[in-house]
Image (cartoon, rainbow, N blue to C red):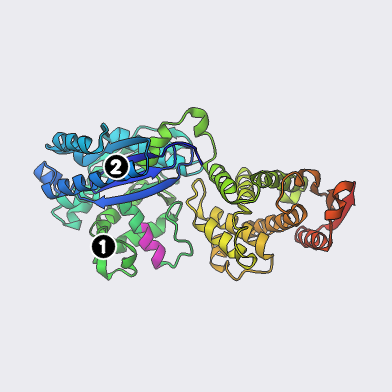
Amino acid sequence: MAGEAPVAVIDIGSNSVRLVVYEAVTRAPVPLFNEKALCGLGRDVLSTGRLAEDAVQRAFSALRRFRGLCDAMGVGKLYALATAAARDAQNGPAFIAECEAICGVSIEILSGRREAELAAYGVISGIHDPDGVAGDLGGGSLELVDIKREVVGNGITLPIGGLALQDRSSKSLNKAEKIVRDAMRDAPVLSEVAGRTFYAVGGTWRALARLHMFQRGYPLHVMHGYRLPAKEVLDFTRIVHRAEPEALAHIEAVSSARRPLLAYGAVVLENLVRTGRPADVVISALGVREGLLYALLDAETRRHDPLLIEAQDFNILRSRSPQHGEELATWTGNFFASSPVLEESTEERRLREAACLLSDIAWRAHPDYRGEQSLNVIAHAALVGIDHPGRAFLALSVYYRHMGLGEDEYAPRLLELVTSGMLDRSRILGAAMRVAYVMSAAMPGILPRVPLIADETHLKLTVPPDLASLVNDRVQNRLKQLARLIGREPSIVMS
């Protein structure tokens, strides 16, 4: 898509060493490859002052593979970062020197403040208009930083990562809880999160969220944008850090390597919510690595909407005519704007435009399965800048465009995620798309010439004489169906 060589980021963390290869440095970078090795570099750093030798050797082995993978994938630019363990250990400099020799690039050793800043940028890059405090929990430390839209406050770092807590507390959760409470007493940024959102970054918190998701039978298994009310977080984390991991229901949803740190992550999150009193917790799958790429962008590119960029990429890759998708967004926009009862908020407008760009991505499938395939692809796509209700709205709108409005066979679980108002809008948008596609055959140049307008009493489709042959019973029946949804009388005007 980008016409550039891929870019890669190696993140040498206190718990895991990870490689992510992205298509390019863009506002919505798409991961081409993602692999981690749980090395546990920060396991005993606080008690011994050194990186454990077995952890070091595992990290070197992972980095050799990652370097080879970058060469095989034709990576044009490789960035490498190291966090708390390498920063704090006595043998950290020697370890980093060997890592640089293996990777063939300089490694940026992040200060706590820089790590918090990049984590915040990661949240900004993947959450639409964030407002709250981001917290990145690693093996060695917790970084906290205030965010309001694209503005990042001063970050702080606390030495209460999962491995660090395990080490300092001698594996006593009671001692760990006291260490966490003491550390948070000196974290003024937590006073800024009251009534706002806490954005949770890091593998341990994603594992906790996955466990919560499976326990409640949540209908969408996508981590990014998963939202938990603060009260639920308190109840759930209390259970997790007081129970044996293997006794928890659905514990198999969490990798066995992550399970020993679940209780420590729960202790940190419980005390953070109790101290800061956020309204809710939202999981961000994007963090320091994506934050680094965001930091490389110019100011204008940062202002782009990542959801619409990704939807446009899908449109280019999978639609019969990308131009038609863009025309459909304008055509439906004029239709919605023509009627006061269909007035859109800014958020509703961006979701409608994204749905239009995604509306033809399943055209190569068998007609009987286009709705089902669209639903699954859109609901589970690696989209950012969108929450779970928004995902459901996009998927349902395109589903109805293919399957018709009376068919919910494949959609019942997604219906749980949207409000009645969002469901009504998805049906209206799907019905409008059904008119557009049967009129235009997904080809460009037609929709701009056949405006659809809703006034106080009528829904009017205007067709010029040279396109009159395109009007048939299917067009008329779909126009009637849309008119019934919005309480208008349908009419086709040849003009």
Residues rendered magenta in the picture = 209-215
**Crowding at label 2, few (<14), some or many (≥20) Cα neighbours within 10 Å?**
many
Q: Tell me: 403 left or right of 220.
A: right
Query: Mark 1 = which residue?
Result: 256
Q: Quadrant of residue 485?
A: bottom right
Judge by depth and name the residue closer to the eye, 137 or 232.
137
129 drawn magenta: no
**How far from the left and from the top, in percent, is residue 275?**
33, 48
Query: Mark 2 = which residue?
Result: 11
**Crowding at label 1, few (<14), some or many (≥20) Cα neighbours within 10 Å?**
few
Query: Can residue 160 be seen?
Result: no
Residue displayed at 28% across by 42% down: 67
> Is 236 placed above or below 29 here?
below
N-term-proximal mark, 1 vs 2: 2
**How far from the left and from the top, in percent, is residue 261?**
24, 56
Query: Can residue 321 be seen?
Result: yes
Can you name the residue that lies furthest to the left here?
48
Indicate the secondary structure of the residue bearing disc 1.
Answer: loop
Identify residue type, mark 2.
Answer: Asp
**How far from the left and from the top, in percent, is residue 255?**
29, 61
